[in-house]
């Protein structure tokens, strides 16, 4: 039934009478201008560029927020993160997706998919009091994932261990793991007490427990046999992703592959050290490209590439100096991580959420470039249509629009309205963009980022058709437009529910 409903743009021959596999590759902190097919010249990304040249490259695709946890929440729930007050989480935070909330993997499970997540999680685990030495619940399984292999939070936060199917890998009962984000625990070294042990210096926030010569946010004791080595991330995570693909190659599968790269701390594998002249950040981009290529090669080797939809993108815009001294800003040269756009990670300007997005499906998607306005939130409804699932109720993907024809290159009619979330909210409508005044003070650490943020205590209005770099605030010239967009934004904030929600 599904394939008749979309037969105007997918033929039976193309899909071979079976639901396509789906892979979302979600890179961390990758900017619009960080890869070759989006203009980068000082770093080579041949694997991602190959996907783009054989797939659909979007120029106006957005993650939902300019920071990681909110974007990931929105991707998996089809809901704006501000509805759940989702913010950047500490490493011991509880799961922020309620197990009763409909999710993208849960929806795909109902469609007959095996579902897996590999890589950075950062959506919380447990119920607020985690025992890292036992089975951790709730977690990915409770929100729709059959398999999980996780970095629990981020590379710069404790606990610095892998968690597979909600148990710490190589946990040792005789050396129990304890984690604290309030006070120091154990006798282990910290960055501010033992700077001589560090591979790279860090700011005060990132100068707590040292693991693998790198100080982190938070304190941890125990678990020596379980500790990761940052340089191993690309090999271990990519191999786990391949294992999941191989285990499910006979059945439709969904893989959410969430990279640690190019998030700090940037500690590339030896294979990639010195690959660029931009230092660890540039080398991490090359490493990310290799990981992406390994997944595509695996699909081709198994003969399932033509039945696999791959979506490649990033959770937010770029950042150079983000807590560690790796000389990213000093070695940037002529490279422009944000491309022609203003801002980056944490920012309300375009580069905060406008990220590289490539949709690749051999023999189904024709190569091209799309200027359609889309959001990662729309993946939920679009994949529901692709797999024949009907969204029901007011709490299932309430902010997600069906953009399947757009994702497959059969239409260029994207959204007419889009919300961008930072430490405030912005709204896009046609060529107009409105940024509302900041309602609360951003965290103290944000001031040190030296990023054009767009976070002001007054209203801002830009016409992106004439001012793509958001140089001129014309709010005072167009008060009627400001009021109209503010009212539209307020309406979306207060009452977005599926039955009556219109763009």
Image: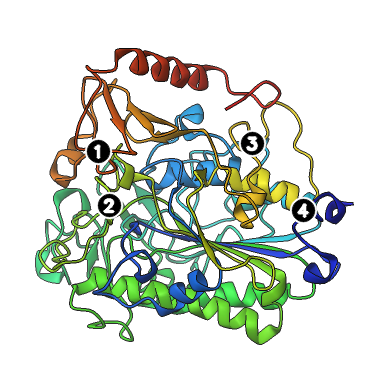
The quarter in which the C terminus is drawn is: top right
Give left or right: position of 395 versus 113: left
Q: Say which label, 4 or 3, has the lower sequence index.
A: 4
Identify the image's colour scheme: rainbow, by chain, secondary structure or one colour. rainbow
Secondary structure of the residue carrying tag 4 is loop
Q: Nearer the viewer, mark 2 or mark 4?
A: 4
| Residue found at x 74% / y 65% | 20
Q: Nearer the viewer, mark 1 or mark 2?
A: 1
Q: Is residue 360 above or below residue 209?
A: below
Q: Nearer the viewer, residue 225 or 326?
A: 326
Q: Residue 86: x, y in percent?
A: 45, 35
The CA span between labels 2 and 4 is: 41 Å
**Coordinates of residue 346 in the picture (x, y in percent):** 29, 42
According to the picture, the residue beneath numbered tag 3 turns out to be: 397
Q: Which residue is mark 2?
A: 217
Q: Nearer the viewer, mark 3 or mark 2?
A: 3
Mark 2 falls on what kind of element?
A: loop
Query: Mark 4 highlights which residue?
Result: 387
Q: CA distance from mark 1 to mark 4?
A: 39 Å
Q: Residue at x 27, y 52 (%)?
A: 217
**Lower sequence index among marks 1 and 4:** 4
- The 10 Å Cα crowd at callout 3, few under 14, some 14 to 19, many 20 or more, is many
Question: Do the numbered discs 2 and 4 sit on residues whose CB atoms are within 8 Å?
Answer: no
């Amino acid at each position: 039934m599904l394939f008749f409903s979309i037969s105007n743009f997918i033929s039976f021959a193309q899909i071979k009478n079976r639901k396509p596999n789906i892979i979302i590759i979600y890179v961390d902190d990758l900017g619009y201008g960080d890869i070759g097919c989006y203009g980068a010249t000082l770093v080579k990304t041949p694997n991602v560029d190959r996907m783009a040249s054989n797939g659909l490259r979007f120029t106006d695709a957005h993650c939902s927020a300019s920071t990681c946890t909110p974007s990931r929440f929105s991707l998996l729930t089809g809901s704006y993160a501000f509805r759940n007050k989702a913010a950047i989480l500490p490493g011991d935070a509880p799961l922020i997706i309620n197990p009763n909330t409909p999710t993208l993997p849960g929806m795909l499970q109902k469609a007959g998919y095996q579902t897996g997540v590999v890589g950075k999680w950062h959506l919380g685990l447990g119920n607020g009091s985690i025992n890292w030495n036992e089975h951790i619940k709730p977690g990915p399984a409770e929100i729709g994932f059959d398999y999980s292999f996780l970095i629990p939070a981020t590379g710069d936060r404790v606990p610095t261990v892998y968690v597979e199917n909600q148990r710490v890998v190589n946990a040792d009962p005789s050396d129990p793991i304890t984690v604290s984000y309030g006070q120091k625990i154990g006798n282990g070294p910290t960055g501010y007490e033992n700077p001589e042990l560090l591979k790279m210096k860090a700011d005060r926030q990132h100068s707590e427990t040292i693991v693998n010569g790198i100080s982190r946010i938070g304190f941890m004791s125990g678990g020596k046999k379980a500790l990761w080595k940052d340089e191993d991330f690309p090999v271990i995570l990519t191999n786990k992703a391949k294992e999941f693909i191989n285990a499910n190659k006979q059945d439709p599968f969904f893989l959410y592959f969430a990279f640690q790269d190019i998030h700090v701390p940037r500690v590339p594998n030896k294979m990639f050290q010195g690959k660029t002249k931009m230092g660890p950040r540039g080398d991490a981009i090359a490493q990310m490209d290799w990981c992406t290529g390994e997944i595509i090669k695996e699909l081709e080797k198994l003969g399932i590439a033509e039945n696999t939809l791959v979506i490649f993108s990033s959770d937010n815009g770029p950042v150079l100096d983000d807590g560690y001294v790796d000389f990213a800003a000093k070695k940037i040269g002529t490279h422009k991580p944000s491309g022609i756009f203003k801002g980056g990670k944490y920012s309300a300007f375009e580069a905060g959420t406008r990220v590289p997005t490539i949709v690749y499906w051999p023999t189904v998607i024709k190569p091209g470039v799309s200027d359609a306005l889309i959001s990662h939130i729309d993946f939920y409804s679009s994949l529901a249509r692709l797999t024949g699932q009907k969204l029901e109720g007011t709490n299932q993907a309430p902010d997600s629009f069906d953009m399947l024809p757009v994702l497959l290159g059969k239409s260029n009619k994207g959204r007419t309205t889009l919300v961008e979330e930072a430490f405030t909210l912005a709204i896009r409508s046609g060529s107009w963009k409105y940024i509302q005044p900041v309602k609360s003070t951003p965290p103290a650490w944000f001031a040190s980022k030296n990023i054009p943020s767009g976070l002001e205590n007054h209203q801002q209005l830009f016409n992106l058709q004439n001012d793509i770099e958001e140089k001129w605030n014309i709010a005072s010239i167009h008060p009627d437009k400001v009021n109209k967009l503010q009212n539209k934004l307020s309406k979306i904030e207060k009452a977005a529910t599926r039955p009556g929600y219109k763009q």
